[in-house]
């Protein structure tokens, strides 16, 4: 492990701060704490594997309980609204008082949510189970993003990408595991995945033991703002733009994650298992793109990566509704690679705009991502009920055009990167 990094806290209650006052050269002298980064990324993998199971078993739930698309969307909303509502609150609280063992405790809610989902026989119980998994996600993401940054050794984009790629790989594994396990063995087999949650609890408890001695309580010396830093007004505008960009990215990804299986079944007549394999291909491409985005942002600048990753996907999303089955698979690979590369850059850009509020900012942006996904899934489900799944994808194809708003992002001081 690296030698301890001081995380400061003002008396009596002040923000938990990471070592941003140091120069990037000093911050990166010891290098990243790779064991911690690997542990938090693997925990993210396990967390998002369990989360993605919810969307992956939608066809089973739809058939077993005669649900319509609007009810399917409400399951997503129940899961993601819980995470969206609580993540900024958790992040704000841990900015003031770090909770090194909160990650393991939050994972316990996911553990019980999966067990409940495996035995749920009523729609209301399914919603409660999804909400419990969402609550575990709300506790996990803000503090784990802070730990990833603390262990970065100054390579903030790289650390955020390592953290993100774990989640993206986990998300991609859900449909594959559902096709191999849940579809053949039915809803009760979801309980088997609670063992994954238990493994995550053990790992996160160990990471909490590493994190606890990194925290000290002393008043930090005042840090003068960088002379080239954007004004408070520009910061507010930039944060609003970043939220809008995340909206375009996350809503499109949510449309594919929640309804791509139904789209393939409806348009091409493939089986549920085959459709889940196609969804896995898209989500795996997302994972690769999520890893590449952070280091590219460190090397070329986050604004350039944001421009490319949002607008670059537009030609492929416009072509998808008119492509055949195999061409659709190829297009979704390009879409996943390009559009997912922006997540790390957006989050690190936002963290740099609001220093010493990393938990709250991470919570807001992860929360917005979940909230947009949940609300968007519900709205798109209602639209699909009144029109068709194919029409939904024709509408969503234009979402990356919102990337044009990146022109309003300020130029950050070079020292920040």
Image: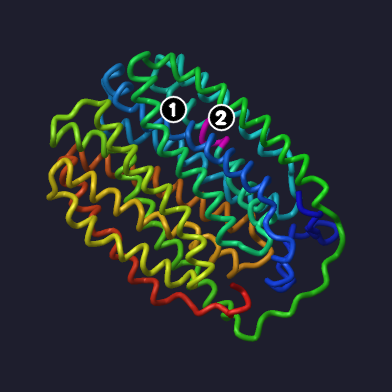
Mark 2 vs mark 1, foreground winner is: 2
Residue 297, given in percent of the width and then of the height, sits at 49, 66
Horizontal and vertical percent for residue 137?
Answer: 55, 39
Q: Residues within 10 Å of mark 1 (few under 14, many from 20)?
A: many
Marks 2 and 1: CB-CB under 8 Å? no
> CA gap, disc 2 to disc 1?
13 Å
**Judging from the image, what secondary structure is the residue with disc 2 in?**
helix
Residue sitting nearer the eye, 53 or 369: 53
Image quadrant in which you'd find residue 280: top left
Tell me residue 328's x, y (percent). Answer: 20, 46
- In the image, taking residue 264 as reference, residue 234 lies left or right, namely right
Whichever of callouts 2 and 1 sits on the residue coming sooner in the sequence is 2
Q: Is residue 338 above or below residue 271?
A: below
Residue 250 is one of the magenta-drawn residues: no
Question: In front here: 55 or 305?
Answer: 305
Hey, which residue is sitting farthest bottom in the picture? 227
Q: Is residue 62 left or right of residue 351?
A: left
Find the magenta span and give its range: 132-136
Query: Can you see residue 44?
Result: yes
Residue at position x 37%, y 30% in the image: 176
Q: Could one spot residue 378 in this view of the protein?
A: no
Disc sitting over residue 110 in the figure = 2
Residue shown at the point (51%, 70%) measured from the top left: 299
Q: Secondary structure at mark 1?
A: helix
Residue labelled with disc 1? 127
Q: Quadrant of residue 123?
A: top left
């Amino acid at each position: 492990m690296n030698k301890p990094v001081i995380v400061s806290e003002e008396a009596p209650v002040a923000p938990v701060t990471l070592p941003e006052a140091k120069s990037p050269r000093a911050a990166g002298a010891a290098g990243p704490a790779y064991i911690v980064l690997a542990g938090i990324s693997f925990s993210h993998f396990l967390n998002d594997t369990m989360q993605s199971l919810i969307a992956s078993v939608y066809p089973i739930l739809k058939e077993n309980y005669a649900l319509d698309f609007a009810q399917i969307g409400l399951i997503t909303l129940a899961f993601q609204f819980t995470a969206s509502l609580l993540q900024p609150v958790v992040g704000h609280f841990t900015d003031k008082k770090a909770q090194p063992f909160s990650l393991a405790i939050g994972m316990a809610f996911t553990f019980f949510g999966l067990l409940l989902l495996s035995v749920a026989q009523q729609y209301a119980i399914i919603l409660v189970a999804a909400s419990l998994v969402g609550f575990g996600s709300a506790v996990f993401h803000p503090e784990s993003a802070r730990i990833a940054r603390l262990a970065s050794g100054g390579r903030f984009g790289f650390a955020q990408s390592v953290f993100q790629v774990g989640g993206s790989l986990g998300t991609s594994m859900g449909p594959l595991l559902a096709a191999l396990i849940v579809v053949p063995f039915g809803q009760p087999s979801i309980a088997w995945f609670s063992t994954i949650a238990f493994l995550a609890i053990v790992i996160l408890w160990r990471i909490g033991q590493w994190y606890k001695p990194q925290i000290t309580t002393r008043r930090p010396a005042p840090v003068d703002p960088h002379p080239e830093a954007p004004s408070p007004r520009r910061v507010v505008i930039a944060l609003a733009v970043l939220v809008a960009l995340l909206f375009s990215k996350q809503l499109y990804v949510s449309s594919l994650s929640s309804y791509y299986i139904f789209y393939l079944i409806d348009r091409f007549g493939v089986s549920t298992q085959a459709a889940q394999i196609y969804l896995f291909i898209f989500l795996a491409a997302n994972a690769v793109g999520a890893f590449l985005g952070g280091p590219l942002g460190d090397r070329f600048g986050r604004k350039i990566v944001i421009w490319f990753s949002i607008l670059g996907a537009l030609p492929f999303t416009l072509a998808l509704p008119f492509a055949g089955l195999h061409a659709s698979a190829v297009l979704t690979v390009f879409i996943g690679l390009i559009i997912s590369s922006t997540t790390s850059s957006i989050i690190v850009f936002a963290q740099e705009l609001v220093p010493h509020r990393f938990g709250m900012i991470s919570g807001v942006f992860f929360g917005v991502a979940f909230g947009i996904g949940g609300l968007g899934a519900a709205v798109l489900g209602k639209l699909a009920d009144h029109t068709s799944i194919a029409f939904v994808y024709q509408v969503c194809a234009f979402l990356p055009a919102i990337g044009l708003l990146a022109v309003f992002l300020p130029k950050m001081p070079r020292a920040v990167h």
